[in-house]
Image: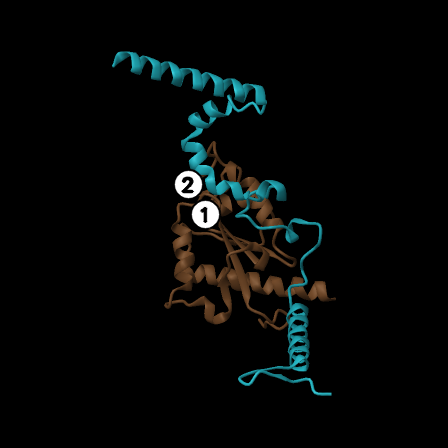
Amino acid sequence: MKFILGSGYTFWNPLIWIIVFLVVMVMVYFFRRRGQKGYKKGTDQARIFLCGEEVPEAEQRHIRVGNIYWGFFETLKEYYNFILKPHTGIINDYILWFVVAIAITVIILLIAGLAK
Amino acid sequence: MSLTAFKRALWVYHLNTGSCNGCDIEILAVLTPRYDAERFGIKLVGSPRHADVLLVTGPVVKQMVSRVKRIYEQIPDPKLVMAVGNCGTEGGVFYESYSLAGPIDQIIPVDVYVPGCPPRPEAIIHGVVMAWVKLEKLFKQEVA
């Protein structure tokens, strides 16, 4: 059985990849065996080092993707707080805003037309 | 004096607990070309989890107590603690200050004391060698 898949310029041989994988696994096992054995599991020796500070829980350590917008939210905080209040999620409120906006626009147009 | 059991380099984690930096500068002098402690395999490392020796300077201010304990706990066994400078050994010029919880041996067990204000690099190297010898004994005990 022929394992080599040639493309004219290069080739693909799964046997070579398996050999490379095994060699890497042997190297990893070798280095891991030579590692420090003095660590005691379940103690501070196996915990994260954060310059001596107490390490918070994983949920509190992680930074959410939304944090890249933190500067915008902080700068426009007052605007957001104001604009969030009308966004009630109730369709009747939105229709009411629509009707009010249309009424104001019509009044402005009427006044502008009368003024001419 | 022979070093046989502890066959690898001695890695040291340096912790400043409120020192004036005098001792810290002398520790740096130990690593400069004039003394060059790294040629003996004595090396400063950036994490206590890689260290064999905890080298502490300063008199241990109250805010550093939990940090000192936590860093000591994070060093793998066998481990040793070196107190460098008068402040670390007995309080020095800060003796009986309102902000102190130390000296160091009131917080964690100390194995080697290097007095001086600041101690000379030769004294620090001598202290590290004493620590190394003691670490050899601990290592042999653990193996046995």
Per the rendering, the mark at residue A12 is: none
Q: Residue B51, how many percent across, how many down?
A: 57, 59
Which residue type does callout 1 highlight? Asn
Report whether residue B18 is seen.
Answer: yes
Residue at the disc numbered 1? B86
Q: Residue A25, how many percent across, how many down?
A: 67, 73
Name chain A's colour. cyan
Report whether residue B118 is seen.
Answer: no
Q: Residue B53, how many percent across, how many down?
A: 56, 58
Name chain B's colour. brown
Above or below B119: residue A27 = below
Under tag 2, what secondary structure?
A: helix
Under tag 1, what secondary structure?
A: helix
The answer for which chain carries disc 2 is B
Residue ranking furthest to the left: A116
The residue closer to the viewer here, B84 or A91, is: A91
Question: In which quadrant of the rendered view does residue B48 lie?
Answer: bottom right
The answer for which chain carries disc 1 is B
Q: Check if mark 1's residue and mark 2's residue have beta carbons within 8 Å.
A: yes
**Which residue is pictured at 57% across the width and 40% down the height?**
B66
Question: In which quadrant of the rendered view does residue A62 lie?
Answer: top right
The residue closer to the viewer here, B113 or B79, is: B79
Residue at the disc numbered 2? B93
Which residue type does callout 2 highlight? Val
**Which residue is pictured at 44% across the width and 32% down the height?**
A74
- How far apart in space, not on screen, are marks 1 and 2 (Cα)? 8 Å
